[in-house]
Amino acid sequence: MSLRHIHWVRAIGGAIVAEVLLIASAFVWVAIYSYLINPNQPLAVYEQHALDSGPWVSILVGIPLFYAVARWIARNRPTALSLCVIVLVFDASVLLLTAGTAFLPLWIVALSYSSKLIAVWFGGAPVPLEQDPQPR
């Protein structure tokens, strides 16, 4: 595997698609919670629920989402892994910038990142050996 196998446009586009859909899924979950599960509560209840459920939504929705994005947008394992690294660097930057507003246990961050990495590993197809530019 080398950098030659990475389709950067697909990796960046897939990262954007995955991040947007992941954020949208968190909003959808809080809307479902606020309208159907626990309606007529103060706004602070829903804000706290968003903070509490966000990491779990990211894990539960992220696994099939990252698998699908790796399979249909990235189309190969090096591009899929690059897509994942782009998302994780962006996400880690946001977590570090907002570290004072909410505390996330390290184990849940590790679970979230590792589950996404495993999903793109299996979603991205390996590059066939005959396409490998490295001499044997």
Image: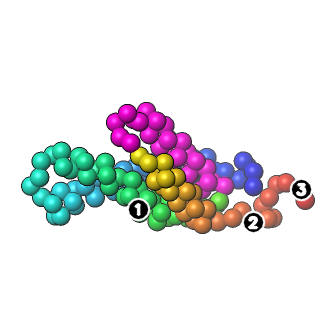
The residue to which callout 1 is attached is 61
Residue 72: x percent and y percent?
Answer: 53, 63
Residue 37: x percent and y percent?
Answer: 18, 64
Front disc: 1 or 2: 1
* Chain-order first, disc 2 or disc 3: 2
Q: CA distance from mark 2 to mark 3?
A: 14 Å
Residue 58: x percent and y percent?
Answer: 41, 56
Residue 42: x percent and y percent?
Answer: 12, 48
Residue at (60, 66) in percent of width and height: 122
Task: Provide the residue span drawn in magenta.
Answer: 78-103
Q: Amino acid at mark 2?
A: Pro
- Res 65 quadrant in image: bottom left
Residue at (50, 57) in percent of width and height: 111
* Chain-order first, disc 1 or disc 3: 1
- Res 26 quadrant in image: bottom left
Answer yes or no: do the residues labelled 1 and 2 have beta carbons within 8 Å?
A: no
The residue to which callout 3 is attached is 135
**Mark 2, secondary structure of its residue:** loop
Report the side of 7 relative to 87 (left or right).
Answer: right
Q: Which secondary structure is most common in the magenta stretch?
A: helix
The image's mark for residue 128 is 2
